[in-house]
Image (spheres, rainbow, N blue to C red):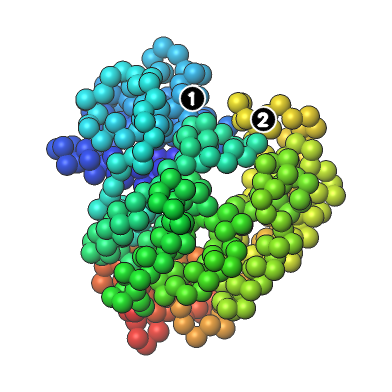
Amino acid sequence: MTFGCKVNQYESQSIREAWQALGGTEVADPARADVALVNSCAITAQGERDARHALYRLRRAAPHARRILTGCSARLAAADLAGADLPDVLVPQEAKSALLQGPWALPENITTAVPRPYPPLRISRFRRARPVLKVQDGCSHRCTYCIVPLTRGPAVSRAPRAVLEEARRLLDAGHREIMLSGINLRQYGRDLDAGITFWTLLELLDRELAPQWTGRARLRISSLEPSQLDSRGLDSLLASRMVCPHVHLSLQSGSCAVLRRMGRGHYRPDILKKQLETLHQAWPVMGLGADILMGFPGENAAHVQETLALVESLPLTYAHVFPYSRRPGTPAAAFPEQVPHQEKLRRAAAVRTAVARKRRHFLQELLQQPDMLVAPDGADSGKGVNEWYVTCRFRSLPARKGHDLLSVRAVGVEGNALVVIPTSDGEA
């Protein structure tokens, strides 16, 4: 059972492949399981609750299974459990790679920290049609609200050639859209040779893969820090033949004052706005997403209006908007001027409403596009995503081969998705 971010999805797949290579067989019914793994998240208090509730359910559904708790909330969630609800094995996030040796080769608890090279996790396939390819782990920045540096440790980077090899494995396995993911891609390369950055990695992948795969497969970037959209970042994005015209930004707030309190004073919304204008000129049709955190301690009505004004000015096509969640052990948990829960929800709802208007407008614009390329979700799925990260629903299930990109045309809007039909050419 996997909770949380795309990096967790990747790590679960790596463990799955390792256990299957050791002779394990995955079962859908927990009652048939000899071992059950909960891969947890700690980004919000809800993430911890999800892990605890998963262990409760597994105790009832799989009373004879060995229950293993790992992931970012392993220690935090376990602290609130007792007796029969405790996991049989606790594997903290920093020791997750120990799971690769198999579920029976583990002590009951792994309490000592392990060295921090890049963990030896790898995959050769993915359960979903669009795989995640993890290139970086950890974060050394320490935003005042974020518990991730406490659970995942400092930033570490995967060797560029290892990333390239895995991308080739996934393409050879039939996948046609790969998402490059990490905890903080801005810190990629800092522990490698001088001069290596995430943009170095993207340029390597493009140089090596584009001759064979341009137009047939693509890369998508999971999330960028706004400060990465400097001149080097813009040049790399616009020169790429493989990357989707879509960026997702860890924006968090449109107020400089709030960003400074968050420990995120390394970018300014007004400069970001100009950088996105440059990108939008080169990508007239562009998917733009953002993470936005509302109700941070000290945020007032004027700060909320600054965020709303920025949202209105950016070419956003979607956003993940969260009310601030107080995380024990982070500086912001002790900040004065905590915003009442209901007010946090109200502010988050106001931003979601503003983003939803922009989303509807973008979907109407896409109805004018003569064609787009959709990566189907699976062989029998009636939906997928286009290059701008918009869900597309097929009017009728198209004939297709594997996970190949499909050339389609939008003919309608259904909620937050497009209704599409194949163009005359069909497969890309």
The image quadrant of residue 233 is: bottom right
- Residue under the image location 39 percent in, 79 percent down: 407
Amino acid, disc 2: Pro
Can you give x and y, in whole percent of width and height, for residue 63 in the image?
30, 22
Can you give x and y, in whole percent of width and height, for residue 176 in the image?
33, 67
Left or right of 30 on screen, residue 140 = right
SS at mark 2 in the image: helix
For label 1, the crowd category at 10 Å Cα-Cα, with few meaning under 14, some 14 to 19 and many 20 or more, is: many
- Residue under the image location 76 percent in, 50 percent down: 256
Res 246 seen here: yes
Compared with 112, 95 (above or below) is below
Report the residue marked by disc 1: 77
Question: Which part of the image, by quadrant, shows the N terminus?
Answer: top left
- Residue under the image location 58 percent in, 78 percent down: 282
Q: Closer to the camera, 73 or 98?
A: 98
1 or 2: mark nearer the eye? 2
Left or right of 305 on screen, residue 365 = left
For label 2, the crowd category at 10 Å Cα-Cα, with few meaning under 14, some 14 to 19 and many 20 or more, is: some
Compared with 388, 70 (above or below) is above
Q: Which mark is residue 331?
A: 2
* Residue that sits furthest to the bottom in the current view: 424
The image quadrant of residue 61 is: top left
Compared with 116, 225 (above or below) is below
Mark-to-mark CA distance, 1 and 2? 20 Å
Can you give x and y, in whole percent of width and height, for residue 210 in the image?
34, 74
Res 53 seen here: no
SS at mark 1 in the image: helix
